[in-house]
């Protein structure tokens, strides 16, 4: 019963934070989305990838924040060149993650690549699309 009360209270607090960020302005909601993406991706990496692989985890988190920034730029800026350049940079980072992982001496490089890309789609892209 005590666990239910704690979870309910934390859910109400989280909901209040989200609603206050939405009502305050778009920038506060984007900052909150970035914080949620960072925390969610770190939790995912702690559950799936063993210790080590810090460079790949960090690069994946940076790419996750890049998705949110890309959609924020699409909302703010009328310049059509900047989002295209940003998309090219994100695609290059996908390639860099793959190359780094393939040249390391690990037992399952393709599994590690998948475990680095899944949170980008499952966590980061969903939060980025929510900011539209």
Image (cartoon, rainbow, N blue to C red):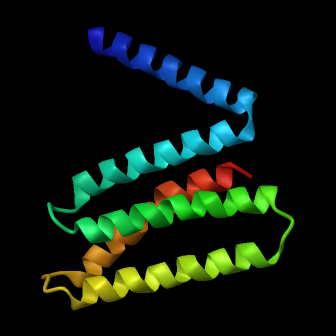
Along the horizontal axis of the image, is 129 left or right of 63?
right
* Above/below status of 114 relative to 37: below
Expressed as whole percent of the image width and height from the top left, the position of residue 31 reads: 58, 43
* Above/below status of 110 relative to 4: below
- Quadrant in the rendering for residue 91: bottom right
Expressed as whole percent of the image width and height from the top left, the position of residue 118 reads: 41, 66
Instruction: Pick whichever, 67 or 126, lies toward us.
Output: 67
Along the horizontal axis of the image, is 7 left or right of 20?
left
Residue at x 37% of width, y 10% of height: 5
Count of residue discs: 0
- Quadrant in the rendering for residue 23: top right
Residue at x 26% of width, y 74% of height: 112
* Above/below status of 81 relative to 30: below
* Above/below status of 112 relative to 14: below
Quadrant of image for the N terminus: top left
Instruction: Pick whichever, 120 or 87, lies toward us.
Output: 87
Instruction: Pick whichever, 26 or 10, lies toward us.
Output: 26
Q: Residue furthest right?
A: 78
Along the horizontal axis of the image, is 77 left or right of 97?
right
Residue at x 47% of width, y 79% of height: 93
Question: Residue 59, can we see it?
Answer: yes
């Amino acid at each position: 019963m005590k666990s239910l009360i704690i979870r309910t209270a934390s859910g109400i607090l989280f909901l209040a934070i989200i609603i206050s960020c939405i009502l305050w302005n778009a920038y506060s909601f984007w900052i909150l989305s970035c914080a949620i993406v960072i925390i969610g991706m770190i939790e995912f990496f702690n559950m799936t990838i063993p210790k080590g692989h810090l460079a790949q985890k960090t690069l994946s988190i940076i790419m996750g924040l890049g998705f949110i920034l890309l959609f924020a730029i699409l909302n703010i800026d009328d310049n059509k060149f900047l989002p295209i350049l940003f998309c090219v940079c994100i695609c290059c980072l996908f390639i860099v993650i793959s190359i780094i992982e393939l040249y390391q001496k690990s037992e399952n490089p393709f599994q590690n690549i998948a475990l680095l890309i899944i949170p980008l789609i499952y966590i980061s892209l969903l939060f980025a699309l929510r900011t539209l």
